[in-house]
Amino acid sequence: MRSGLIDRRSFSRAAGIGFLGSLLPHKLFALQQAEAVFASGFRAPDGTYGIATVSVRGEVIDRIALPARAHGLSYCKATGRAVAFARRPGTFAMIFDPSGRAEPVVIHAPEDRHFYGHGHFSPDGRILYASENDFDGNRGMIGLYDATDGFRRIGEFAAHGIGTHDMTVSDDGKLLVIANGGIETHPDFGRTKLNLDRMEPTLVILEAATGRLVQRHTLPARLSRLSTRHLDIDAKGRIWFACQYEGPRNDLPPLAGHFAPGEDLTFLQLPQQTTELLANYVGAIAVNRGENLVGLTSPVGGAAVIIDARNGRVLAEQVIRDAAGVAPAPEGIAVSSYTGELCRTRSNLAWDQHLIRIG
């Protein structure tokens, strides 16, 4: 089942349980009444994996089983659908309707590709873009999937880098923004990093209609081991990026920054104590557009940091063991953890690295 669509029955067997196709009445009511709803991958106490929707109070509204661990997610406001991608080097992605009104669709990467764990819908919901690894060609790619035709794969664009990880789309749908982490991997070697001595992290902007390269930023040589990993866009169209450092542990490189079309990269000059708290590893980044906030989390450092997007000033730091996902909340920033914390509520589900707000 490496390529094409697989049917509901086959996927349900692999996952271990079925999907009801519609929420039970009390769950649908909870979804409709919640002030905010989030979605995240999880690992259950019995070792199984899935996706859960969760209220701002930390109440689990619904769960969908998966046969393996998920990583990044994306939500489309136009269609109400969300997608969860398998953790690298996984080959499946599941598109689902959080309201339960439609059954999930599962797609697989082509035989010579694997997903990198992230993707994004076009604003109108017609195209799903996915970050992929052409592992034999040692190059990152962006796969294009037609959401109007069962998510059939209809093409691909070069990502102009290797280790392609997170990617997103501008609000007008005209630009694709890509974080190429610069790390070479191959599924024959699992998650082993094969080129730490010659990394080339880049941040790239493509024209969404054609794949034409618009802008490509290569990090300076002194930061060649600073892997550009995750992205979000603020209300003014400024692109925020977060990094993970593969160099010596006692170095203190900048771990986040921003840029925009036609602009150079600007790195945040965080206080030394904040950089030390993040432990050279930002696992996720999210923007609260309404409040001009940027949230960073570090499972390595066990911390969450909130930054004023207007001036880069640190507004808050919090020690959260295994801090993982981050998303805009009705007020401030919501944080999840591998140990089951979400919105200050503890669950028996171990949340995965990424959290999105839906609805």
Image: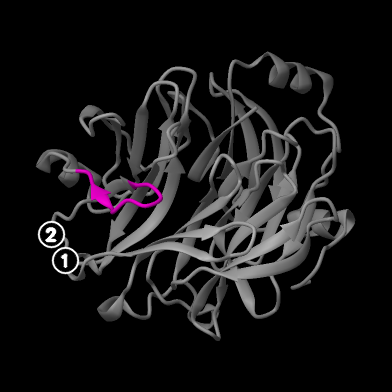
Q: Quadrant of the N terminus?
A: bottom right
Q: Where residue 155 appears, x then y in whole percent? A: 71, 69
Q: Quick check: 304 above or below 12?
A: above
Q: Is residue 133 shown in magenta?
A: no
Q: Residue furthest front?
A: 262
In this figure, which residue is indicated by the disc labeled 1? 248
Q: Residues within 10 Å of mark 2 (few under 14, many from 20)?
A: few
Magenta residues, start to end:
259-268
Q: Decide if residue 4 is on the left or right side of residue 30.
A: right
> Which amino acid, mark 2?
Asp
Q: Where residue 243 appears, x then y in whole percent? A: 32, 54
The part of the image, by quadrant, that contains residue 107 is bottom right
In this figure, which residue is indicated by the disc labeled 2? 251
For the point 12% across and 59% down, the residue is 251
Q: Quick check: 17 above or below 336?
A: below
Verify CB contact (< 8 Å) between mark 2 and mark 1.
Answer: yes
The part of the image, by quadrant, that contains residue 308 is top left
For the point 75% across and 65% down, the residue is 153
Q: Is residue 338 visible?
A: no
